[in-house]
Amino acid sequence: MHRETWIFGYGSLIWRPAFRFEQMAPGYVVGWARRFWQGSADHRGVPGAPGRVVTLVPEPGARCWGMAYRVAESELDEVLRALDHREKGGYARCDMPLTIVGDMESGAARTAIVYMATPDNPDYLGPAPLPVIAAQVLVSRGPSGSNVEYVLRLAEALAAMNADDEHVSELARLVRDRHEAADHAVDRLFSARGGRPAGIARR
């Protein structure tokens, strides 16, 4: 009998799944909150200078919104191999109850594969004040790009879904403000020296 397989993304999988799927829909998992508590030494940072990316932490009554993808049975093994490699930096697969838009009316019950980093993985950084996380994000960059891009794209993707996440939106505000302030400071420095040299763009 054919069994539906869903993969739930709550971080970069929202805007860059990079695998083939049959259907995508906004959805959420209950009892979990998204937090920038996982270190990234392979995507948004490097060994010795990790960036910060999201994982899920238990929080009774919380609702974490993201994007759900239904994957064809014939594609599943290939998709999971690719995701296992992509999420190798501390993440493990688990199954969670999933609700997608439309299920609230139909009462459908679904389960999704979710990649989650737990506190026992070697790259786990744990909680920190948001200003401290923002400072780390601002200086972190890895093979997949800057940590700033990761934070801002996640915030934009959630806003486009009308999904409220105070942790993400407040961190994005701090990062955006400090990033722009740093650019303005550099502009003032170059202005005092006669202008920004050709080939040196704003970040």
Image: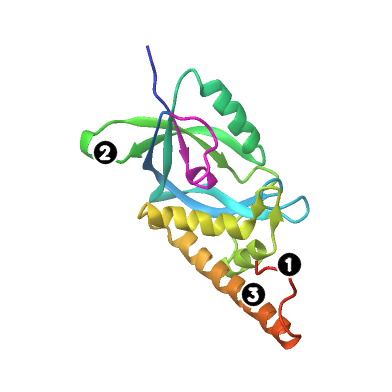
In the rendered image, residue 147 lying in the magenta stretch gets the answer no
Query: Which residue is painted at 59% across and 54% down in the image?
Result: 37
Q: Position of residue 176 (x, y in %)?
A: 55, 69
Q: Is residue 88 visible?
A: yes
Q: Secondary structure at mark 2?
A: loop
Query: Which residue is painted at 40% across and 46% down in the image?
Result: 31
Q: For the magenta stretch, what is the residue range?
A: 6-21
* Residue lying farthest to the front in this orientation: 198
> Colour scheme of this structure image?
rainbow
Q: Position of residue 83 (x, y in %)?
A: 59, 33
In the image, residue 188 above or below residue 127? below
Q: Amino acid at mark 1?
A: Gly
In the image, residue 49 above or below residue 72? below
- For label 3, the residue is 183
Residue 3 vs residue 55, the one in the foreground = 3
User: What quarter of the picture does the C terminus occupy?
Assistant: bottom right
Which of disc 2 and disc 3 is earlier in sequence?
2
Q: Which mark is residue 102?
A: 2
In the rendered image, residue 11 lying in the magenta stretch gets the answer yes
Q: Secondary structure at mark 3?
A: helix
Distance CA(mark 2)–CA(mark 1):
50 Å
Query: Which residue is painted at 52% across and 54% down in the image?
Result: 35
- For label 1, the residue is 199
Q: Secondary structure at mark 1?
A: loop
